[in-house]
Amino acid sequence: MILDVSINGISLYGLGWIRENIDFPTPQSQTNTIVVPGRNSPIRYTESLGSVSYQPRSFTITLSMQGKREAFNQKVSEVVNRFAGRLCEVICSDSADVYAVGTLEASPTYDPKSHKGQLVLSCTDGDAYLYHTKETIVAVSVSGTVTLTNDYMPVVPVITTTAETAFSWKVGEDTFQKSVSAGIWEFPEMELQEGKNTLTVTGTGTTTFRYREGRL
């Protein structure tokens, strides 16, 4: 398999670049601790809001090509004019089920002795999570219990109803109930956690849940 990188759906291998290396380190958590004199352990606020938040993801993609400087400059121009300074979706061929989102910057270098050019694409403000390339869609047309399976990233589904519909679900010890007419809805309280999330749907129409899963 040829290792490739696609940016906004455009293959860099198709543009004449060879992928030499990629580096997608795990983003660090947002931490805040306070050391109190007399205490043997600090006060930690990493999960003060109930979940862990993460720093922006940084990553680099190293590309190369062999040829004359004129050809190298042309290929660099194609990439820079399309992607440099822009918010992009990046997919690596060996993990094609997820994509990263971030602003790309380009750093080209050329060695006239070996006639080898190198282009490093870097990002320092990427979203912490990698998103599934396929949106998860669950549709039900009968009343009953619905199970929504989610990856590690918390997400609120977008719900489309075609008739009056009632929802009931639990988060921890709290129970929530919503009754809506036909339309498109989002309930912040219906944040899906990792694993199987169950809720009850009561109505005569079709109810569709749409959400994009993600993981670190």
Image: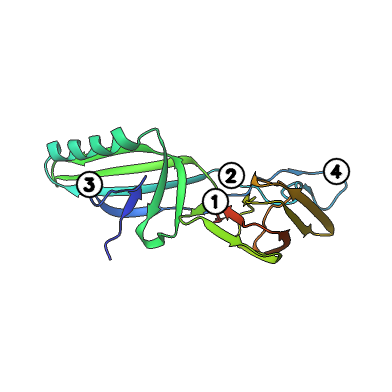
Please state the horizontal and vertical placement of residue 205, each as a whole percent of the image.
65, 57
Q: CA distance from mark 2 to mark 3?
A: 32 Å
Q: CA distance from mark 4 to mark 3?
A: 60 Å
Please state the horizontal and vertical placement of residue 123, each as a whole percent of the image.
43, 41
- Residue type of the residue flagged with mark 3: Leu
Q: Mark 1 highlights which residue? A: 129
Residue at x 34% of width, y 50% of height: 6
Q: Is residue 110 left or right of residue 38?
A: left
Q: Secondary structure at mark 1?
A: loop
Q: Nearer the viewer, mark 1 or mark 4?
A: 1
Please state the horizontal and vertical placement of residue 180, each as a whole percent of the image.
73, 47
Q: CA distance from mark 1 to mark 4?
A: 37 Å
Residue at x 13% of width, y 36% of height: 70
Q: Earlier in the sequence, mark 2 or mark 3?
A: 3
Q: Mark 2 highlights which residue? A: 55
Q: Which mark is residue 15?
A: 3
Q: Earlier in the sequence, mark 3 or mark 1?
A: 3
- Kindly check if marks 2 and 4 are in contact, taking CB atoms under 8 A apart as contact: no
Q: Earlier in the sequence, mark 1 or mark 4?
A: 4
| Residue lying farthest to the right in this orientation | 38
